Image (spheres, grey):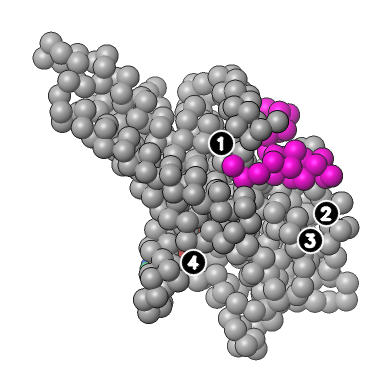
């Protein structure tokens, strides 16, 4: 089947699933800060979350272009893929850098939905964006590593069987480069919880199932280390382009939802005896957001093309994420303004999606850090930090 046909099929499947999970469903989950388990299960049952896993491990072996359409279509339908998107890109670390045994052990179970790999443990409270300063340690003792430290903002940890964890195996002052000495582990969450790991939910302004995690002498089998000891930072980096492209696609989906919602309202709502969309003060911001979203979409497509061709797409993936997150935020603000007071009413879903899309200028990487990347690596300006 041609890629375009696959994409159409996938969009139809997503749209059918999303129609079973209307705004009411998301509003209730949001109000109670509950994980949308039923929605994630429906996506799993349809095989959508295993789209990037190769066929030999039970997935459908599709390119990133298809995964991007899946998350975009979810957001365009007013739903949210954040409850499960991490699985799509974190499994790439096992696929690219794991041993044959690890791939056989984990990938088929992830593909079938028997195991969830939704948690990605990198950020720490003191290190923040400065990942190489993390202080969670993994010390080798015989055939296991002992983990000590703390992570923050680790999303979906309560709803995942596995977590990909970044920890320091060699102290920073003993390595030649600060990016060395970090290792990646696959942590069995249920086992770890019985052996010194504690997960505490963090309530946030959006329903994101995020947590902080404490490690107190948590043993992890040495065979669960991915790739070489001390090389973990490069393994994590290698998955970041896919992550940025998928997040950018979610932002495009959000922006389209806001534009469509604003357009429909602006056509229907009559004030002073005419549709509000007849006023240029309402019409032009919608048109501007449309143009901004279309332009961001082109950058997302360019990044996807490069990624799927196996070419370097660092700059494009970063720019796609930057432009798409700004387009979705501009569209969110425009949509709320176009609705007047009703934009603030829960039942319109605008305030919920407004809160949800705001996240993407901060996580998984904040706008400033993308600008710093472009400044230094693309434009050749001095490193700013
Ligand atoms: C809801 C949510 C879910 C998340 N999920 C996960 C997850 O699953 N796994 C995970 O590992 N992490 C996760 N994160 C963490 C996320 O990746 C970080 O919040 C993000 O990378 C920003 O880091 P920080 O919060 O530590 O901000 P900081 O690093 O403290 O930065 C604060 C501000 O200062 C700016 N800043 C810092 N240094 C510079 C500089 N040198 N130049 C210019 N500006 C600078 C930043 O851009 C930012 O605006 C999540 C965060 C949130 C809020």
353 to the left or right of 32: left
Badges 3 and 4: C-beta atoms under 8 Å apart?
no
Quadrant showing the C terminus: bottom left
Q: Between disc 1 and disc 4, whose residue precedes?
A: 1
Query: Seen from this angle, which residue lies furthest top?
Result: 273
Q: Nearer the viewer, mark 3 or mark 4?
A: 3
Mark 3 falls on what kind of element? loop
Instruction: Read off the residue under disc 3.
Output: 98
Instruction: Read off the residue under disc 4.
Output: 128
Separation (CA) of disc 3 from disc 1:
27 Å
Q: Nearer the viewer, mark 2 or mark 4?
A: 2
Instruction: Read off the residue under disc 1.
Output: 69
Residue 348, compared with residue 358, is above or below; it is above
Q: Between disc 3 and disc 4, whose residue precedes?
A: 3
Instruction: Read off the residue under disc 2.
Output: 103
Magenta region: 37-65
Instruction: Find residue 24 and report its horizontal and vertical position in percent.
Output: 49, 21
Mark 4 falls on what kind of element? loop
Q: Nearer the viewer, mark 2 or mark 1?
A: 1
- Indicate the quadrant where residue 59 lies: top right
Q: Residues within 10 Å of mark 3 (few under 14, many from 20)?
A: many
Looking at the rendered structure, the number of numbered marks drawn on it comes to 4
Separation (CA) of disc 2 from disc 3:
6 Å
Q: Residues within 10 Å of mark 4 (few under 14, many from 20)?
A: some
Badges 2 and 3: C-beta atoms under 8 Å apart?
yes
**Is residue 52 inside the magenta stretch?**
yes
Badges 2 and 1: C-beta atoms under 8 Å apart?
no
Q: Between disc 3 and disc 1, whose residue precedes?
A: 1
Badges 3 and 1: C-beta atoms under 8 Å apart?
no
């Amino acid at each position: 089947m041609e890629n375009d046909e696959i994409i159409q099929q996938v969009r139809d499947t997503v749209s059918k699933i999303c129609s079973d999970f209307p705004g009411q469903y998301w509003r209730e989950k949001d109000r109670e800060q509950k994980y949308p388990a039923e929605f994630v299960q429906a996506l799993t049952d349809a095989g959508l979350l295993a789209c990037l896993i190769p066929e030999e491990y039970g997935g459908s072996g599709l390119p990133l272009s298809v995964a991007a359409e899946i998350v975009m279509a979810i957001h365009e339908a007013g739903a949210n893929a954040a409850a499960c998107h991490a699985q799509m890109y974190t499994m790439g670390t096992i696929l690219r850098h794991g041993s044959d045994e690890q791939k056989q052990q984990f990938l088929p179970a992830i593909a079938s939905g028997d195991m969830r790999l939704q948690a990605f443990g990198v950020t720490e409270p003191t290190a923040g964006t400065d990942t190489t300063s993390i202080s969670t340690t993994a010390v080798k003792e015989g055939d296991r590593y002992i983990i000590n430290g703390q992570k923050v903002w680790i999303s979906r940890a309560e709803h995942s069987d596995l977590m990909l964890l970044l920890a320091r195996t060699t102290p920073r002052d003993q390595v030649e480069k600060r990016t060395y000495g970090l290792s990646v582990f696959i942590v069995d969450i249920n086992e770890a919880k019985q052996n010194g790991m504690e997960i505490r939910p963090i309530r946030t302004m959006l329903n994101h199932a995020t947590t902080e995690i404490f490690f107190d002498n948590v043993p992890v089998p040495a065979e669960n280390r991915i790739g070489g000891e001390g090389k973990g930072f490069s393994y994590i980096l290698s998955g970041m382009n896919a992550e940025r492209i998928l997040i950018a696609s979610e932002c495009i989906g959000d922006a389209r939802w806001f534009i469509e919602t604003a357009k429909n309202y602006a056509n229907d709502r009559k004030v002073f005896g005419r549709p509000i969309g007849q006023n240029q003060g309402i019409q032009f911001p919608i048109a501007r957001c449309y143009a901004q979203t279309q332009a961001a979409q082109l950058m997302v497509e360019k990044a996807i093309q490069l990624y799927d061709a196996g070419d370097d797409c660092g700059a494009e993936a970063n720019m796609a994420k930057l432009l798409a997150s700004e387009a979705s935020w501009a569209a969110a603000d425009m949509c709320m303004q176009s609705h007047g007071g009703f934009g603030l009413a829960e039942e319109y879903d605008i305030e919920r999606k407004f809160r949800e899309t705001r996240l993407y200028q901060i996580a998984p990487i904040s706008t400033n850090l993308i600008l710093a990347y472009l400044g230094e690596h693309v434009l050749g300006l001095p490193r700013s930090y």
